[in-house]
C-alpha cells in the first residue's frame, strides 16, 4: 500500500528526515514512536504533501502511484487520511456539510455520482452509530469550541465517513486525556480492516495497549533506528529513549 524509500526532507533548508524507509501493507497497524523533535510530525507532513517541506531525495509509492507527484487533495482522494495534530476550526461551516463535501469530492475523483441527501443521511447514521458520536456535534461549526475529546470524536467520525485506505494519526506529545485516548483507540479498532492500514504516531503506551499495533518503529534524528513488534513499545516504556540515544546518538 505504502512504500517509503530513502526519504530525505528539509524545512527552511534544514534537513530533518535523513533517509526514511518504511513498508506498510493493507491490514497492518504501524506505530511510530521516538523522542521529541525526531521528525515524526515532519514525516506525517511529508506524506500529507504540505508544501513547506521539501523532499530532497527518495521516493514514496502509494497504491502503486508516485505519491510525491500528487497534490495534497489528490492524495486524500486516493485514500490518504491525515488526522491533524491541531485540528482547524472552520466557523460557519457545519461538520455535516464539511464531510459531505469531502465525501462527494472523493466520489467524483473516482468517477462516482455524488451521494444524494437520503444516501448521505443513511451513511451518516450508520457511521454515527459505529463511532458513537452525538448528532448535536455534527450540526455545529467544524471544531469550533469543541473540547479535546470532541475533536477526537469528530476526527474519527471523518475517518469513518471517508473510509480511507491509509490513515495517519499524529497524536501530540501532550494533551490527550484518557477519554480522548479511548475514543481514538476504540474508533480505530472499529475501523481497521484487512483492506486498510493505519500509522499511528504516539508517545502513549496506553494507546498502543488498546491498539495492539503489528509493528513499532522508533524514529530518532530523522531515521528509523529500530523496528519491532509491540514488545518494542514495552521496552521503550521500561527503559525510556536513553538507550536509543546512547546507541544511535553518535551515528545519527
Ligand atoms: P516530532 O514530531 O518527532 O517531535 P517534528 O517533526 O515536529 O518532530 O520536528 C523535527 C525537527 O524539525 C525539530 O527540530 C523541529 O524544530 C524542526 N521543525 C519542524 N517544523 C519546523 C518548521 N516549520 N520550521 C523549522 N523547523 C521545523
Ligand atoms: Mg514534537
Ligand atoms: Mg510531532
Image (cartoon, helix red, strand yellow):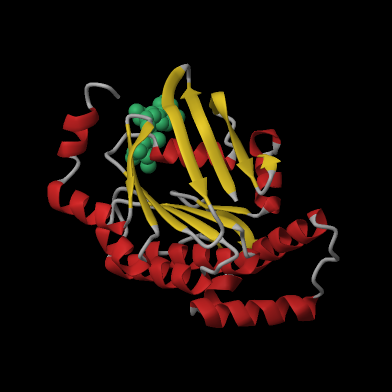
Along the horizontal axis of the image, is 166 left or right of 228? right
Along the horizontal axis of the image, is 239 left or right of 133? left
Residue placed most toward the observer, 79 or 250: 250
Question: Taking the image as four quarters, which one is ligand 3 found in?
Answer: top left
The answer, for residue 237, to whether it is visible in the render is yes
Where residue 59 sits, quadrant-wise, is: top right
The answer, for residue 133, to whether it is visible in the render is no
Identified at 50% across, 76% down, the residue is: 131
Quarter the C terminus occupies: top left
Task: Residue 191 in the image: state x and y as whole percent.
Answer: 52, 70
190, above or below 146, in the image: below
Task: Residue 156 in the image: state x and y as whole percent.
Answer: 50, 66
Identified at 70% across, 38% down, the residue is: 70
Residue placed most toward the observer, 18 or 26: 26
Along the horizontal axis of the image, is 230 left or right of 137? left
Identified at 40% across, 59% down, the residue is: 214
Task: Residue 117 in the image: state x and y as whole percent.
Answer: 78, 76
Amino acid at each position: 500500500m505504502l512504500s517509503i524509500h530513502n526519504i530525505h526532507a528539509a524545512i527552511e533548508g534544514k534537513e530533518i528526515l535523513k533517509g526514511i524507509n518504511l513498508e506498510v501493507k493493507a491490514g497492518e497497524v504501524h506505530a511510530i514512536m521516538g523522542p521529541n523533535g525526531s521528525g515524526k510530525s515532519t514525516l506525517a507532513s511529508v506524506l500529507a504533501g504540505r508544501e513547506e517541506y521539501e523532499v530532497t531525495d527518495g521516493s514514496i509509492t502509494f497504491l502503486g502511484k508516485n505519491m510525491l507527484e500528487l497534490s495534497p487533495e489528490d492524495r486524500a482522494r486516493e485514500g490518504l487520511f491525515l488526522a491533524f495534530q491541531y485540528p482547524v476550526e472552520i466557523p460557519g461551516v457545519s461538520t455535516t456539510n464539511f464531510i459531505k463535501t469531502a465525501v462527494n469530492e472523493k466520489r467524483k475523483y473516482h468517477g462516482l455520482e455524488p451521494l444524494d441527501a437520503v444516501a448521505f443521511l443513511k451513511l451518516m447514521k450508520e457511521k454515527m452509530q459505529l463511532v458513537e458520536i452525538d448528532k448535536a456535534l455534527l450540526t455545529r461549526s467544524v471544531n469550533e469550541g469543541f473540547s479535546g475529546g470532541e475533536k477526537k470524536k469528530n476526527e474519527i467520525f471523518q475517518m469513518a465517513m471517508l473510509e480511507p485506505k491509509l490513515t495517519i494519526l499524529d497524536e501530540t506529545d501532550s494533551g490527550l486525556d484518557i477519554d480522548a485516548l479511548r475514543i481514538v483507540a476504540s474508533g480505530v479498532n472499529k475501523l481497521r480492516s484487512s483492506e486498510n492500514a493505519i500509522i499511528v504516531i504516539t508517545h502513549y503506551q496506553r494507546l498502543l495497549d488498546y491498539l495492539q499495533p503489528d509493528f513499532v518503529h522508533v524514529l530518532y534524528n530523522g531515521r528509523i533506528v529500530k523496528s519491532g513488534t509491540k514488545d518494542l513499545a514495552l521496552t521503550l516504556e521500561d527503559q525510556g529513549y536513553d538507550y536509543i540515544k546512547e546507541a544511535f546518538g553518535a551515528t545519527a
